Every structure is written in C-alpha cells, then in structure tokens.
Image (tube, rainbow, N blue to C red):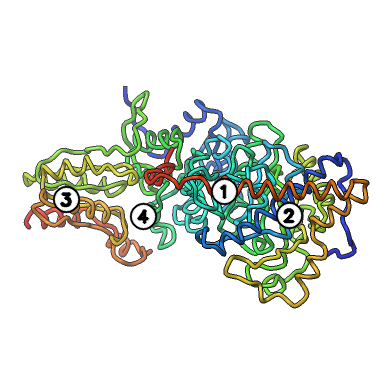
Amino acid sequence: MTATITYRQAVIQAMADAMEEDDSVFLLGEDIAAAGGPFKLTDGLLERFGPRRVRDTPISEQAIIGTAIGAALQGLRPVAEIMFADFAGVCYDGIANELAKYRYMTGGQVTLPATIRLGNGAGAGFGAQHSQSVENWFLNVPGLKIAVPATPADAYGLLRAAIRDPDPVLVFEHKHLLNSEGPIAERPDVPPLGVAEVVRSGDDVTVVATQMMRLRVEQAAEVLAVEGVGVEVIDPRTVVPFDHETVGASVDRTNRLVVVQECSNDGSWGATVVARLMADRFESLDAPPLLVGGDDTPIPYSGALEELWIPSVDRIVDGIRRTLAY
Amino acid sequence: MSSKTAGSRLAADVPVETQLEWLRTMQEIRSFEDECHMMFARGLVRGSTHLCQGQEAVEVGACSALRTTDTMACTYRGHGAVIAKGAPMDRAFGEILGKAEGLCAGKGGSMHLTDMTVGAIGSFAIIGGHLPIVLGTAFAEHYEGRDGVSVCFFGDGSTNIGAFHEALNLAAIWKLPAIFICENNLYGEYSPIANTTPIERLADRAASYGLEGIQIDGQDIGLVHDTVAEAVARARAGDGPVFIEALTYRYKGHSRSDPGLYRPEGELERWMERDPIVLHERALVAAGVDQARCDEIRAEARKNVDEALARAMSWPDPAPESRLEHVFA
C-alpha cells in the first residue's frame, strides 16, 4: 500500500513517528511550536506532543545548537531546526567545532545523537542570504553526517534515520520542494545513511544529483531518452557518507560522469565526487567528468537572474550532450 | 575586588575534615599546574597550556557544592576545574602528555580535559562556545524530571562574546538549573578588562536577563562554597539560573608564551598576599586545626602529584591506528 504525500507532510510525519516511538526525542527551534514552523514543517506537533517536547526558542541559533549538543550529551535525541540553512553561519562554531569534534576530542567518551534540520536551497527568490546549498560548508568537517533528501519518501526516511543515528546528522530540507508530491509506503522503510538510490537506469552516461537538481536531471533524462540516450540517474541521498561505490560501479559501465548541483562548483560535494572518481577509476572514463553548477557569484534575487544561476533542464541536457560527444 | 575581605572564612555548614580536603585539592591543583609549567619548559608538552595557579578556590569551592552526577563545563584554563570535579590527576597528566591512557586517549590535550564519569563534561577552547552547551545539559535534567544542575565556568572575556548573551537569555526564560560562574581574573588574554569592557562589575550583566548577579571574593573558598551551594539549592528547587562573578587572579600569563609583562608592577605580589591556599589554611588554623596537620596535608598533596606524574610519564603513546577511532559511534 502506498499513499501520496507532500515533502512537507513527510517531514512532519517523520518527527511525529519518531516522537511516538521514543520519548527522548524532542524538537526545538524558532517559531516551531505555537506557529507550527515558518515553513509549517512542525505543524500540529505542539498540539499532539505538548510544550515539554516541542519548544520555541528565541532567535538564537547558537543557543539552539548548544542546547541540542548538551541534551544529546545527556542521552536525549534533540531535533533542532535552523530555519534557513544559511543561518548556520551564526552557529557554525557550535556545529563545526563542538558538535562535530566532541566525541573525537574526548576519546569517545560521548555520543551525540543530535539531528539538525536546515531549510536549504534556491529557487524561490529569497536572495543571496536565504538560498544557499549549505551542505557544502560542512564537507571538510569530519564528524558530521549530511543528508539531502529530494523526495517525500526520502524526506521521511532520512529524517527517521538521522534521529535514530547515534551521531550528529545534518538534514537539509529543500525549501523549493516542500509542496512536491510523491509516494510513500504505509510502513515506510528507514534507509541506512550512506546508500545512494539509482533513480533511473541507463547505459550511456551517469548523472549524479541531489534535491531539486535530481528532479531536473530526471526531466533532462526524459528529453534525452527520446533521442535514444540512456541516462543513469543517481541520487546519493547523503553527501556524507557518500556512496562512492554505487557511483563508481555505474561509471564503470557508462564511462561518463556528469554531476549537477545547485551551488558554485569550487569546494562543492560534486567536486569531491569528481576528484575521487578521477583518482580511483581514471581508466573507466571515456570523457572528462563534468560539473554543472551555479555561477561563481552569490545567488541573485531577480527571478530572471536566479533562474540563470540555477542549472536548468536545458543546461543539464546540454552538459550531458557535450559529455557524450567528447 | 572586594578588598574589605582581608582573609577568608570556613564554609558555614561543612565539617572541618571536609574543608581540610579542600586544602588538599587546592594544593594538588597548584602543584599540578606547577608541574605542567615545568613540563612545557622541558618540551614535553605540545601546543599551548593555560594555567590556573591563583584561581583554585573558585574551582574547588564551587565543585565542592556539587554531586558527582551534576555536570560541570569549563574553559581551556580547565585543569583545576576538572581535577576539582574529581578527575584523576594521573590521567589528566597523561592527556596533557598525549598518552594512550590520558583522559581523552591523547586526542584532546591540555585544552580539552574531560571525564564524563565524574560529570566533567568538557573543557572548551573556543571562548564562550560551551555556554550554550550547558543549556542542553541543564535542560535534560528538567526534561527527565531530575534535579541535577549544570555548572559553567568561564572567564571575564567570555562575557563579551555573543554566545554568552544567547546562553543567559535562554537559560533565564526556560528557568534552567544552570549556575554560570565567571572567573574574573581581570585579564582577557593580554588585555586588562578596563580596555575591553565598559563596566567594572560583570555581575551587573545578569540584570539584562532578569537574573540576580552575585559578585564575590573568589580567593575565599568558604565564601565561594556557600554562595554556590545556595545557588545550587535554588536551581535544584526550580528557581532557575544564577550568575556568580568570582574575583580572582591568575599568577601566570595567558598561555605559555606570555610572561604577563602587561601587568602593573606590584599587582601580582598584592594578589599573592591573598593566596587562596594560604588564606584557607589560616582559616583552618584559626578554627582550631593544627598547623602541622595542614603542613602534612599539603605535603601529601605534593607527593600525590609527583606520583601521578610519574605514572603518566610511564604510559605509552597511543597506538597509531587509534587516530582513526572515535569519529563516529
């Protein structure tokens, strides 16, 4: 049995099911309780679980992250919301210096089962400070797991997996996908973190993408299918840990790699994937790997400009064609 | 400082025998820090170290008001606080020496001494970084319906960083069982407090959060204990956080490369006349304890430190493969 739900409903259901299952799970963040969340991602949870477990905070990202760390240290399973992922800059110390390193610096004395949810991504005209793909800021910080769900099923499954995980997990929820719909099983699977999904099989080129770019890549694959081109679409679902095996095995067959991402390419997860593939599977490649990403600029506000910044279906199709033609 | 308090006094409701143990612990911390200083000079310790000679009464007095299950977070100048909370000195030395049997398996070092088994939840090396974390440990007590408290030590410099404001604000509105103890040693790194802070009495900052701010003589261990014990009782009873400013002084510079030349002539000597260990010993003797007993306890303390260091020095370095452990559970 499957039903159709929105990405937003999936996020809410994941938290509700986790709280139902485990009393140590609680939620905190700005306007998540009485208001149900600025993006309505906690709608109804205060009414259902009460103010002990669903807690409004001041506009204090450092306090939110610190509270999550300290509570996790004491065995609770906090789920903290950072409204716009870009605000991670305000609490970067808490995430990168404290949360990520705490277990290591104490020689394994502590475990930190903290989940941080962050509103990610562009496409809605929020401008340069509210539109970034912030998972990239944390790639060089060992100690964090990073999930980037694209579909309602993954929004549910990865959040459940994050809350159950004994380690800190950042879950980036794409703001532009909140109303997107998809199927979810009656008893949905909770996938392991670090396992990619082969979204579509194909023999000619491997295209890796997450979140909104995955959806555009699927559209691009449809366009190319008409021309007889088989595009294999892979969604890694977590960028840390990254499923290099699944991507690598695919490239061994297709001999071509395109990574599509909603960010500038330098220092991005896609750049890491390309570097790793070049080092490990150089002989498999018949063409240089291609990164399709945003420009090396902040994200512009104007709809006319933002749509040029974000890789479009046309730009993705063009990139794949060039890679095939090499 | 409240220089009207010339000496110190014994704590009101604590057996004298217990307060003799405070003398021992303060002397152990003093000697521990002296040994760290020498280990640096001999090149046995990497990186930097931040010593707390002169501040022992704050750490021992405050921790003596806690249960083992209460939590304590401190700064990178945290050797004394962690020992005061009950961490073994040999494993603390071991950590500073980078040994496998160090408290943190050699992965933390001087600035990150932690012993979860005694509630010493961490020494934090980003100024102010730990104040928000204490919110969470205190919140967990509320959430689970327990009456534990969380103590947070920090320096005067921390009161100028944003995390301080966020932490005290949230602690106050959630009425968390957190005791914020500012060890005001008059210098934020190399800068005298007057150069960086527009008010003299840091306890006044508590008013911004609707909290009482208490300023005390941090060299008087009896006073520190009694003040913290009362704050702990209030926090356990659900009355929320307390902000205590303890006036104290660090005898050494900020870190190993700092000889403290920016301090006015005679300031160090004036503070050493009010050495917390000497003051406490005088108070004990005034209460009828034999001087010889005090001498004996302090000699034992020095011996304990020597033995702890010898043990730590004998331990092996961590195994190479251990560097890959403890990233994830």
Quick one: A300 or B217, which is closer to the camera?
B217
Q: Which mark is residue A136?
A: 4
Marks 3 and 1, how far apart at CA? 40 Å
- Hey, what amino acid is under mark 4? Asn
Whichever of labels 4 and 1 marks the residue nearer the N terminus, that label is: 1
Q: Which mark is residue A257?
A: 3
Asked if the residues shown at circle 3 and circle 4 are in contact, with their CB atoms under 8 angstroms apart, the answer is no
Q: Chain of mark 1?
A: A
Marks 4 and 1, how far apart at CA? 22 Å
Q: Secondary structure at mark 1?
A: helix
- Hey, what amino acid is under mark 3? Leu
The residue under label 1 is A66
Location of the N terminus of chain A by quadrant is top left
Dot 3: few (<14), some (14–19), or many (≥20) neighbours within 10 Å?
many
Percent position (x, y) of residue A205?
A: 13, 47
Q: Is residue B196 left or right of residue A40?
A: right
Marks 2 and 3, how far apart at CA? 62 Å
Residue at the spot 57% in from the left edge and 31% down from the top edge? A49
Q: Are marks 2 and 3 on the same chain?
A: no
Residue at the spot 36% in from the left edge and 65% down from the top edge? A300
Dot 4: few (<14), some (14–19), or many (≥20) neighbours within 10 Å?
some
Q: Nearer the viewer, mark 1 or mark 2?
A: 2
